[in-house]
Image: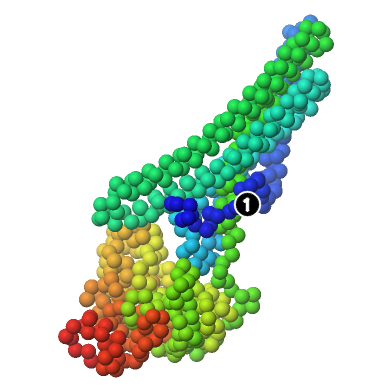
Amino acid sequence: MTDTQNSQVAQNPTGDRRLGSLGMIWAAARRYPWRIVAAGVALLIAAAATLAIPSGFRLVIDRGFIGGKPEDISRWFEYLLMIVAVMGLATASRYYFVSWLGERVVADIRNAVQRNLLRQAPRYFEENRPSEIASRMTADTAIIEQVVGSTVSVALRNTVMGIGGIIYLFTIAPKLTGMLLLGLPVILLPLVTIGRRVRGLSRSSQDRLADIGSITAEVLSAMKIVQAFGQEQREERRFATAVEHGFATARRRITLRACMTGVVIFLVFGSIVLVMWQGALDVAAGRLSGGSIAAFVLTGGLVAGSFGALTETWGDLLRGAGAASRLNELMIAKPDLAAPDMPTAIPSGTGARISFDNVTFRYPTRPETAALEHFNLDIAPGETVAVVGPSGAGKSTLIQLAQRFYDPDAGAVRLNGVSLKDADPAEVRATMAMVPQESVIFAASARDNLRYGNWTATDEQIWAAARAANAETFLRALPQGLDSYMGEAGTRLSGGQKQRVAIARALLRDAPILLLDEATSALDAESERLVQDALEVLMEGRTTIVIAHRLATVRAADRIIVMDGGKIVEQGTHAALYAQGGLYARLARLQFQDAPVA
């Protein structure tokens, strides 16, 4: 994917400039205050116990080894064992609580992102690739899980140990500690300078990983087409190119992190060595005891190790900030179509009337072409209106607007006199059952796919709908019947079987408005006749919009609307339109050949 093809959702010029993006993670974590407190207490106890070990060795050397009795030496080592036991218990508790928080926070973020995505209008997914969004939901949340469940804990532990260790070093040897601290600005300078570049590369690395996930999902979902056209090698090269781009970005990132880690550790431990040098001279001169210098060396090692580990956790925090900013974009995206603060209720009890009042509409991805232009259509309650015309005439756009997947640029779409802009989209869609041109089958059981139209439907109702849609025979032949798994995107079903499942789903919906978009396009002649009979029964008393290319399926409609260029060019019955000799008659002659038209 080129830079110009990057989706809008990936554009965030400010989100990864600082660790402020981690605020989203903190907002999710603070819902569990007692877990945070427990993890914090365990962390402090573990850090204090670790820092107490050098003090214990100081007492062992000064009070036990030097002129001490064997029982005194044993007593001080018993104290050391107690400290180690406390440290082990506190560390285990810290690990449990922070790991729990990591898993819980990631689960909550995933749920929040998915909840917001489900509110977005179709336009959002036209401008932002679903495969990239899916990659963010997996790869980026995995990074956040690592940050919350490990990196933050390690960073806090090392910060506490570093600060606590420095304080303890001042109590042992203030002069040596002052010398040690003089080297801190030299250590922090490369950390800040190189860290800025690492932060930018962390974001780029996540973008490249999203590209890889997007290509994988795209190719796997179209594997039959790839193999049918012999494009395996091309797709292999395309995937390899994306992987190499990702590797190149990651290599730059890890090179900088390695340099940053090496430089900082050299400076930290170099400072320790120089300070120890001076300490050894103080011991030789009698200004420090042997226990003090031993404690100073051990504590200095802990402090150096803490600051060295912070350089690594800093890089992980930067990656987490980049991942958090990318997920936050999905979480805060505002839906283009939302219910008004005070939605107008749709009047019921009088049937369902759909009106298109001087509607002009352009798809967001094709603003230069009007899909509908000054379009007017009134569909009476219980009327069946068939919409026909050449491809691109605007037929399916009517259904998209009726379900308020889009709002018109001008004019209004009304349901029982209420403009859809003033109504709750959920209430509008609850009045409709839909059979799309491309049937959607979920990777679930046959039962769940069928009752998607009515989740409370009983098995008897499901079988009745399947029977009416001519789907009962093949469903009963499945290995586990309604419990049979349909496969990813319904791979276990033929095209005609998928369509019949979609029709049965709409039958179970039992809504006052029926929307049929090429509902019988994938059926053979015999199945089409059976399903058409079922649909005719279903359409009785319901307002129905039928989109069709095959004119044989719309002859019985109350009214046929002929569209071209986003406008109505003809309307009437099948026989009347054929007699006019216009566009409908031309389309009919192409399909029916010499068959009678009446």
Q: Name the residue tied to disc 1.
A: 14
Locate residue 152, reporting x and y percent: 64, 40
What percent of the width, then of the height, locates residue 584? 29, 86
**452 over 53 or under it: above or below:** below
Residue occupying the point 65% across, 45% down: 19
Q: Nearer the viewer, residue 137 or 352?
A: 137
Direction from residue 135 to residue 233 in the image, left or right: left
- Which quadrant does the C terminus fall into? bottom left
Q: Position of residue 404 (x, y in %)?
A: 50, 75
Q: Which colour scheme is used?
A: rainbow
Q: In which quarter of the image is residue 475?
A: bottom left
Q: Which residue lies furthest to the top in this view?
A: 67
Q: Which residue lies furthest to the left in this view?
A: 594
Nearer to the camera, 353 or 532:
353
- What kind of element bears circle 1? loop
What crowding class fits label 1: few (fewer than 14 Cα within 10 Å), some (14-19), or many (20 or more)?
Answer: few
Residue visible at 48% across and 46% down in the picture? 208
Residue 109 visible (yes or no): no
User: What's under tag 1, amino acid-wise?
Assistant: Thr
Where residue 97 sits, quadrant-wise, is top right
Give whichever of 65, 381 is nearer the camera: 381
Whether residue 436 is visible to the viewer of this picture, yes or no, is yes
Q: In which quarter of the image is residue 344?
A: bottom right
* Whole-percent x, y for residue 572 in the image: 34, 92
Q: How many labels does the image show?
A: 1
Q: Is 207 placed left or right of 60 in the picture? A: left
Q: Residue at x 56, y 62 (%)?
A: 116
In the image, what residue occupies the spot 36% across and 68% down?
439
